Image (spheres, grey):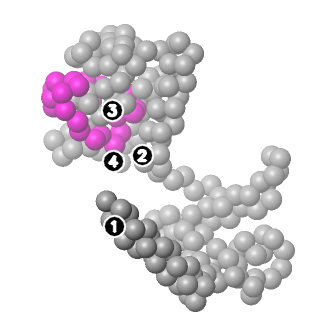
Amino acid sequence: MKKFLKIFSITILVIVIVSIGALLVFGRNNHSNLSGSVPDKIDQYLINEKFQGTVLVAKEGEVLFTKGYGLAATDLPNNPSTLYQIASLSKTFTAVAVMQLVEKGLLNVDNPISQYFPDFPNGESITISHLLSHSSGIPDYLKPNFNFDYSKEWNPNDIVKTVSDSELEFIPGKSFSYIDRLHLVGQKN
């Protein structure tokens, strides 16, 4: 065991030394060629780095710099008003909001969703915890058999209706199925 730890330690040390050497030899550009005001330097840097997205710099509520870079889609340049699909990032916010309600004693993750959606089929066997852990059995409404219409504006209630009209894929809590959009069930109007 001691021999293994010694070899492991030496290997890690060599990797660290080689990495530091590589950074020193091939290190990042220090961007000393940037000139002008801070917004000018930000602009030059982001253009040089081929950044895709929107930047907003603010201090104490005052916007100091905002600009879009690259394309949001084919022939659609990014700008300060571009709306982005943040996909699974919203799950984190939803989970934090749920857990804050739990901390305040306003919600229990073991409560069935029928408590909030009385007409939801199988709602008495699906808990908030099942929704958060992708173990509810509710099918993903973007699967081909749902014929999801991307041209239509969908609100959370429409999506809840779509999935509630479908059979469960498995018994809640007995399996796992990652569903990108199921957090919408928690956004009841």
Figure quadrant of the N terminus: bottom left
Kind of residue at badge 4 = Tyr
Kind of residue at badge 2 = Ser
Kind of residue at badge 1 = Lys
Q: In the rendered picture of this protein, how many numbered marks are placed on residues?
A: 4
Residue 160 occupies which quadrant of the picture? top left
Residue position for label 3: 133
Which sits in the foreground, 6 or 179?
6
Residue position for label 2: 88
Residue 94 shows which numbered tag?
Answer: none
What span is colored magenta in the figure? 160-185
Q: Can you tell which of label 1 and label 3 is closer to the viewer? A: 1
Q: CA distance from mark 2 to mark 3?
A: 13 Å
Q: Residues within 10 Å of mark 1 (few under 14, many from 20)?
A: few
N-terminal of the pair, mark 4 or mark 3, is 3
Whether 113 is among the magenta residues is no
Identify whether 13 is placed above or below 61: below
Label 2 with label 3: CB-CB less than 8 Å: no
Identify the secondary structure beneath mark 2.
Answer: loop
Residue position for label 4: 150
Identify the secondary structure beneath mark 4.
Answer: loop
Q: Residue visible at 43% across and 68% down? A: 9
Q: Residues within 10 Å of mark 3 (few under 14, many from 20)?
A: some
| Residue 119 image point, x, y percent | 29, 12
Q: Residues within 10 Å of mark 4 (few under 14, many from 20)?
A: few
Q: CA distance from mark 1 to mark 3?
A: 42 Å
Residue position for label 1: 3
Identify whether 125 is placed above or below 131: above
| Residue 105 image point, x, y percent | 53, 12
Q: Residue visible at 70% across and 78% down? A: 44
- Give the main secondary structure of the magenta stretch: loop
